[in-house]
Image (spheres, rainbow, N blue to C red):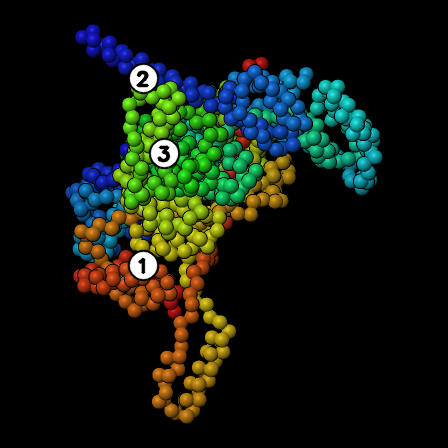
Amino acid sequence: MSAVSQITEKEDTFIKTEENQEELEEQDTSLIRDDQYIFIQLPSGNIKVVKLQKDTNVSLGKFGTFYSNGIIGRPFGHSYEIYDRCQVKVIKNVAFHEVDETDANNKEILDDPSKQKLSYQEIEKLKKQGLEGQDIIKKMVESHSAFDQKTEYSKAKYIKRKEAKFSRIFTPVKPTLYSVWEYFFSKNPGKIRDMRIDTLSQILSLANVRAYTKMLVVDDTQGLVITGVMERLGGYGIVLGIHDGENHNYDIVRYMNFSKKVHDSLLTLSWQQVFKEEIQEPFNYQDELTLSEKDLKYYLRRKINYERIRDTREILWKGEFDGLIVASQYQPESVLETLMPYVSGSRPIIIYHINKEVLINACVYMKISKKFLNPQITESWLRQYQVLPGRIHPSMSTSGGGGYLLHATHIVINESLPTPIPSYMKQKDKLEEFNKSDNNSSTEESNLKIGKTESLNNENNLANHEELQETENKRIKLD
Amino acid sequence: MSFLRYKTIIEEGDLVIAHLSRENMTPLIVDSQKTYNNKFGTFRHKDMIGKEYGTKMPSHNGRGFMYLLHPTPELWTHVVPHRTQILYVADISYIITYIDLKPGSLVLESGTGSGSFSHSLVRSIAPNGHLYTFEFHEERAKAVKKDFGEHGLSDLITVECRDVCKDGFGIKDIVHAVFLDLPAPWEAIPAAKETFKQNRIGKICCFSPCIEQVQRTCASLNENGFVEIKMYECLMREHDVKTIPVYTVADAVNKIKVQQEKKRKRKDQNEQDDDNSSKSKQDPPNLYVTKTPNEAKGHTSYLTFATFLPVLDDD
C-alpha cells in the first residue's frame, strides 16, 4: 500500500513541478530576461534589436548607452530614461496629453532658424556635460524667441520633434508575433514577401492553427509564417517546414525567445528530401568508442542530422497533416501536386502571394481538380487612425497592400461511393470548350472523366444548387 | 472534443457540419437512428459513420450530395444558432494577434453574444489557457454554456451572466488580455483594469462600430493609465476568378462585316453560302481575370487597442 501511495505522491509532485514550470515560463515571458532577444524603441521611433546579456553596456547610438542589469528582471511595458551616463530610471508613460485650445495662431510665424538662439555646438556641449534629454529640450524651448507665439498644437509638435532628437528615453519591447513582424516589415518587407500582419493573422485563423495540430508549411518568408504557427501550437503539435535550398533559413524564429518545448515542434525538410525517389545517402554507423574526441563530436553531429532527416521524411510520407500553408516563390500548382497527398480531408489549404496573378492560375487549377471546396481569393485591407482627442482621422499614409490569399478546404472523393453527376458534366461539348480554353494539362484527364461518368449518369442526374450555379457561371464565361 | 482536436473518421455522437453550399450549412450530431432530409435528398446518419471528414457524400436516394466537414470556429460562425451580431474573420484574426493570444493565455471577453468569437478565442489559448466570458442576457448565457459543454470546451471557459458595466467582473489580478464588445465600453474600462494580472504587461481591445464610441473609449483608456492607444479598421475583400474572351479590333470589324454580309444575303435572298460565314468565325483567346463583388462589407467595427502597464512597486 505504501508503495502505491508513494508512486502517486511522486506523480503528484511531478505534475506540480510541471505546472510550476509552466507558470514560471509564463511569468518569464513578461519579464525582461538575460540572454534573450528584445526590441528597443528609440526616441526617433526606430527599433533596434538586441540580444541582451547581463553585465554589459548596450549602446543606443546617439541616444546614449545603458547598463543591461538596469532593465533585466523588470516587466516589459515601461519606458526608461538614461541618466548619469549608463544608469536607467523608469519613466511614467502616458498615451497622450490633452492639448488646450488657445488664441494663438500661426499668422505671425515665419520660418526663421535664427529664432533658436542655442547653436548646434552649444547643444553638443550640454550633452557632453551629461545633461538629461528633458533638460536640453527645456533649455531649447527657453532660448526659442518665438515659442510663446506658437499654437498649443505646434508647441506640442515642436517638443515632440526635439524629443525625437535629444530625448534619452527608450522602451524595451517584448518580442511578440506583432512586434517581430513590425521590425522585419519596416526593415525589409521584401524579405518576408511583403506579407502584412493582418494577412498573416488571417492565414493562422483560416488554417485553424492551434495546439494538437500537425501543420505542413512551405515558408519562403525567412520563417515568419513558421514563427506564427509555432507560437499558436505552443509546443503541442508539429509544424513541418519545407524550405528552399539545402538548409533552412528560418531566421525570424529565434527572435521570439521560444522555449525548448516550442522549438522542438519544428521539423524541416528541403524540397529534394520531400521526394521518395531521392534516396538518402545511407549513414555509415561506427563504433563510437573507437573515435577520438574531436572525431566523435563531428560523427555525432552527422548521425543526428542523418536520423533527423530520415525520421522527418517518414513523418511527411505518413501524411494525415491538418492543413497546408504555402508562402513560397514556387508555382502553387506544383506545390499542391507535391504535397496534397499528405493532407487529410476537411482540412484547410491556404496559399499566400503578393501577386494576385499567381493565385488566379492556382485558383483555376483548384476549381478543375475537384479536390478543393470553395477555392476563393481574398485580400486584406487595413487602415490605422490617429486617435488624438477631438482629432480622429485615418492616417495620411499607409501600406498599399498586404498580399492575397487563396484558400479552400480539402475534399475527399470516395471512389466506392456513387457520384451524382452535376448536369453540366453531361454537356460534354461545353466542358470540352472550357478545357480547351484552359490550355491545361488536365484537359485530357477531365475528358476521360466525362466519358467514364456519362455511363453513371442516368440514375443520379440532379445536381446541387451550387454546382448548377457553377455550370451557369461557366456557360456565362463561354458565351 | 472535436473543437480542440482533429478527427479523421466520423463516429457516432460527433459534430459534423453538413455543407450543401456556401450559404447553406447545418450542424449535425451524428445519431445512427436519424436521417437528415433536405432538397438534395435523404441522408442517413448511419451512412456517415466510418467516413472520413471532408467526404463528398451522396444522398441515400441519389438525388444529390453534400460535404461532411470537420467543425472549426469559422464554420461554427456560419451555423451558430441564436446568432447575434457576429465578428468577421478579418477582425477576429487581427484581434487575436494584436492582443498576443497563444496557448496558456488568460483572456476576458464581454459580452459573449452567440459565443462565436469565444470559439476562436479558446482555439488560440487551448489547451492550458482560460477564457472568462461575461454575458448580461440570461437566456443567451445559458445557451452558450450548453454549446461550450457540447463542444468539450467547458474546462477552458467560465461563462457568467452579469452586467459588467454595473457590477464589474468579480475577478482581479488574473488575465493577460481583455476584449470588450459592449455598447459603452468606457463604463467597463475601470473594472477591466483590475482584472489584468497586475505585475505584467497586458492588452485590451474595444470593439465599437461608431466613431463617437471610439472617442469616449480612447478618453477613458487614457484616464485609466492605458498607453499606446491605437485604432484600426480591418476588412477582407473577395476577388472572384472567371474567364473572359479577349476580342480585338479586327474582331469588331469582322462582326460588322458579317452583319453586312447577312443583310446583303437577305436582300439577294440567297442562302446558299450560309455555312461559310460561321466557319470563318474563330473563338477568341480567353483570359483569367478577377472581379470584386458589386456589394461587399464596407465596415464592421473600429478596433481600439491599448496596453496595460505593469504596476510598479512604488505606485
The amino acid type of the residue labelled 2 equals: Ile
Return the disc, 1 or 2, that comes first in the chain's sequence. Answer: 2
The chain ID associated with circle 2 is A
Q: Nearer the viewer, residue A100 or A439?
A: A439
| Few, some or many residues within 10 Å of mark 3 (<14, 14–19, 20+) | some
Taking the spot 33% from the left edge, 32% from the top edge, the residue there is A306
Q: Nearer the viewer, residue A302 or A352?
A: A302
Q: Is residue B234 visible?
A: no
Which residue matches tag 2? A15
Image quadrant assignment for residue B51: top left
Q: Do the residues at discs 3 and 1 belong to one chain? A: yes
Q: Is residue A455 visible?
A: yes
The single residue placed furthest to the top in the displayed view is A2
Give the structural element (helix, strand or loop) at label 2. Answer: helix
Q: Is residue A238 above or below residue A349?
A: above
The chain ID associated with circle 1 is A
Position in image of residue A279 (x %, y %): 30, 41
Q: Is residue A454 above or below residue A312?
A: below
Image quadrant assignment for residue A432: bottom left
Q: Is residue A177 above or below residue B262?
A: above
Return the disc, 3 or 1, that comes first in the chain's sequence. Answer: 3
Image quadrant assignment for residue B221: top right
Residue A442 disc label: 1
The chain ID associated with circle 3 is A
Q: Do the residues at discs 1 and 2 belong to one chain? A: yes
In the rendered image, the quadrant that contains the N terminus of chain B is top left
Q: Decide if residue A157 is on the left or right side of residue B99.
A: right
Which residue matches tag 3? A267
> Which numbered mark, 1 or 2, is in the foreground of this view?
1
Taking the spot 53% from the left edge, 25% from the top edge, the residue there is A51
Taking the spot 35% from the left edge, 53% from the top edge, the residue there is A366
In the rendered image, the quadrant that contains the C terminus of chain B is top right
